[in-house]
Image (tube, rainbow, N blue to C red):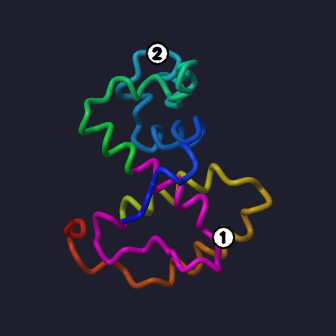
Amino acid sequence: MFDRSRLPPLDPRLLARAAEMFALPANVCFIRGCRRARSCAHVFVDNRQPVCLSNLDAEERRLFDTFAELVRDVRDYSTPASKLLFASPWRGEREMQDAAVAAARSLLPRQRMRSFRAFEALRAKAPPPSLDGFPPD
């Protein structure tokens, strides 16, 4: 089994971009400025997480954390030399991966963009998903 506790923690900027992909600031945040800007502008001081995450129930938070971890993985392992293309044959999983790639793109420094574009070109060559839904657990 893979030990996720050894991975780097999810930083506030990554959590904010992931929340924005789900439109959480516009739909569930109780801070007016976040709703109007449709972006996370406020984080809790103690845990550095966007305020809108506190409005999610347990299942929604579990799904959000899974997506945020996927964004982190795409950000950290999206190089042309990586064997991870994040191109699942399952449609549901591929849609999540597509959203994670879009969120990770905004988190990368300018120096990594050339490498990331090469990664995206390799990913585009992957066959389209042929199976519905998500892989069985």
Q: Is residue 77 magenta?
A: yes
- Tell me the residue that label 1 is attached to: 117
Look at the picture and state if 130 lies above or below 3: below
Residue drawn where x is 37% and y is 50% of the image: 66
Q: Is residue 102 left or right of residue 97?
A: right
Q: CA distance from mark 1 to mark 2?
A: 35 Å
Q: Quadrant of residue 78?
A: bottom right
x and y, in percent, of residue 115 in the image? 71, 71
Q: Is residue 61 left or right of residue 2?
A: left
Look at the picture and state if 136 lies above or below 75: below
- Residue type at the position of mark 1: Arg
Q: Is residue 19 left or right of residue 64?
A: right
- Residue type at the position of mark 2: Ile
Q: Which mark is residue 135?
A: none
> Can you name the residue that lies furthest to the right here?
111
Residue drawn where x is 59% and y is 58% of the image: 75
x and y, in percent, of residue 131 in the image? 23, 77
x and y, in percent, of residue 53 in the image? 40, 29
Quadrant location of the C terminus in the rendered image: bottom left
The part of the chain drawn in magenta is: 67-94
Q: Is residue 85 left or right of residue 82?
A: left
SS class of the residue under badge 2?
Answer: loop
Look at the picture and state if 42 lies above or below 22: above
x and y, in percent, of residue 117 in the image? 66, 70
Q: Is residue 82 magenta?
A: yes
- Tell me the residue that label 2 is attached to: 31
